[in-house]
Image (cartoon, rainbow, N blue to C red):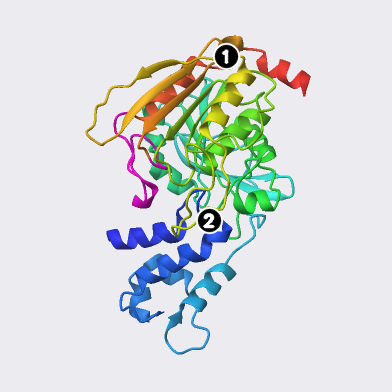
Amino acid sequence: MKPSQMHLLTILGTAFVLVVQAQESPMLAAGFKRADTSGDGKLSADEVNQFSQLKAKLQGADKDGDGFITFEEFRTHLMAGARPPSTPSSPSSPATKLVAGEHTRTIAAGNLQRRYRVHVPKKYDAANPTPVVVVFHGGGGNPESMERLTGMNAKSEEAGFIVVYPFGTGRLADTLLTFNGGGCCGYAMENKVDDVAFTRALLDDLATVVSVDTNRVFATGLSNGGIMSHYVASELSDRIAAIAPVGGPLMMDAPNAKRPVPVMHFHGTGDEFAPFKGGFGKGGAGGKGVTDFESVEHTIQSWVKANGCKPEPEVVALPDKADDGMKCTRKTWGGGKDGSEVVLIEIENGGHTWPGNEPIVAMLGKSTKDISANDLMWEFFQRHPMKPGASTKAESRL
């Protein structure tokens, strides 16, 4: 596939918290404009045929039969093609044990049929309980885009943990999906989708098909996915040992965790979409964003208080390895209950990106190469398994 084709598909099908329902039309407009190479405001068959996946999606879009697709026909047809997330494929069989490779599971969560992808590393041994990292995609994204953006499968192969990529929900089946992280975002929040119950059901189902180390289940995600990571740490502290969100704040007044949950939070000071200091930021089309984000300060201090950490952090400048105009600082609030800590990886001038990896779209800002989010969070996770019996104690307090 040509770079221009990949870019168009990225515009149409990959975004983050900034691309929620109120901004679908601007993003579709950008995709339409890129496909409209003649600039005449309509798509000819030749223009559509440049993009094989777009061609398939636009079958029947030419409603007036004039041989061209206008933007209104383009937009209406794509949105009318939406399938409700509850449209089921058959639930996966609990008896099917997973082996190394890629798998998609379908489960029931409330009255919805939900899906998640699983990457099982080659070194997986069913005889040994294995750590799990749950990776939540950003608002407007999907598991496939999150696999590419994070490179987490490669880290899984190196370290030997299982990666899980949940699907959010939305008007479309596979793109423009969001999670309900308590105070954000989009379709999932507006429709009161219970993504906490989904995560619990996912973990229950996963344990029937792979050998899970239940004391080493961790969560991360970008943007809306980072928000969701904070939310499951708050609401499922009996199941989630530690979290490492990227570019997505805690969107609650305070966490409700029943046990101390170690947190490593990554955030760029130049993030224009989920601003470091909070607020709306900018939207996908350059205008005002659609969510009033909590600040990084609120996020960190909420967890410092919840975990009983020391009020002053230890501050360490991380090595400035790359000539990229960015510097990284690690701030650690230690001394928390049960050995918990809260760590902020502050990326000077960093954007709405995954540290160590190139962003999928340039408008999200710069991504530092001074650090690898995957490496740092895995080191953090290894230091913070759930204490044996902690989940039982948490459940007794629910």
Q: Quadrant of residue 330?
A: top left
Q: What residue is shown at x 35% (from left), y 59% (from top)?
A: 7
Q: Quadrant of residue 172?
A: bottom right
Q: What residue is shown at x 69% (from left), y 27% (from top)?
A: 256
Q: What residue type is labelled 1?
A: Cys
Viewer-side label of 2, 1: 1
Q: Picture coordinates of residue 284 (x, y %)?
A: 46, 56
Q: Picture coordinates of residue 94 (x, y %)?
A: 64, 38
Q: Picture coordinates of residue 29 (x, y %)?
A: 45, 68
Quarter of the image that includes the N terminus: bottom left
- Is residue 208 in sight in this rendering? no
Residue wearing tag 1: 309
Report the magenta residues as a range: 351-371
Q: Is residue 16 left or right of residue 253?
A: left
Mark 1, residues whose alpha carbon is within 10 Å: few (<14), some, or many (≥20)?
Answer: many
Q: Is residue 310 above or below residue 35?
A: above
Q: In this view, does 316 lie above or below 36?
A: above
Task: Check residue 176 in the rendering and tell me which mark sits there, or answer none.
Answer: 2
* Separation (CA) of disc 2 from disc 1: 38 Å
Check residue 368 for magenta coloring: yes
Q: Is residue 264 left or right of residue 367?
A: right
Quarter of the image that includes the C terminus: top right
Judge by depth and name the residue closer to the eye, 307 or 164. Answer: 307
